[in-house]
Amino acid sequence: MDTVRDESGRVLVDRAENGRYRWRAKASNGRIVAISAPAYSGADEARRAYSRLRRDAPNLSARISHVKDGTGWTWVLQSPGGTPLARSIRSYERYATCQIAVAKFLALLAADV
């Protein structure tokens, strides 16, 4: 997998073996906190999608749901039309912890603007 960092080092764009690209967002502690929900045809397209996500963050809604085949909770940020744009990188044991995680990611997006 090829990885490209943006200028801030906070966003990584990865190319998977299938040739598609996804962005991953890093918190200040270096931990990956979110990944793009869709895959993109190019690295530039993935970077532009992250920029749009930052710009549109105040208008997005978070959906928290229980993991289907296990325990825990995950979050997805979606457009006003319901299109998934970003998702948690892992599941959280408690619903409240998942709520905090998505709130922290939204704060990270706001800080990046």
Image (cartoon, helix red, strand yellow):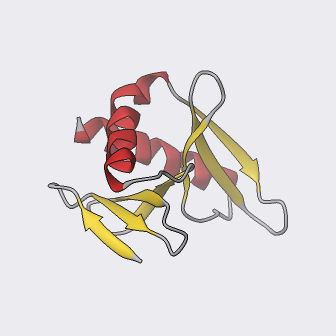
Q: Residue 112, position in %: x, y?
A: 24, 41
x and y percentages locating residue 86 in the rendered image:
52, 46
Quadrant containing the N terminus is bottom left
Q: Position of residue 91 (x, y in %)?
A: 64, 63
Q: Position of residue 61 (x, y in %)?
A: 57, 29
Q: Is residue 18 visible?
A: yes
Quadrant that contains the C terminus:
top left
Q: Relative to the observer, which residue lies in front, 84 or 111?
A: 84
Residue depicted at x 17% and y 55%: 8
Q: Residue at x 33, y 45 (%)?
A: 108
Report the side of 37 relative to 55 (left or right): right
The residue most toward the right is: 69
Q: Does residue 96 appear left or right of residue 68 in this picture?
A: left
Residue 11 position (above or below residue 1): above
- Quarter of the figure with residue 62: top right
Q: Is residue 87 above or below residue 32?
A: above
- Camera-side residue of 50 and 69: 50
Number of numbered markers: 0
Q: At x 42% / y 30%, what residue is drawn?
A: 57
Q: Is residue 18 above or below residue 101?
A: below
Q: Is residue 24 left or right of residue 28?
A: right
Q: Looking at the picture, tell me which residue is in the foreground, 41 or 47.
A: 41
Q: Residue at x 52, y 28 (%)?
A: 60
* Residue 81 falls left or right of residue 18: right
Residue at the left extreme, as displayed: 7
Q: Is residue 29 visible?
A: no
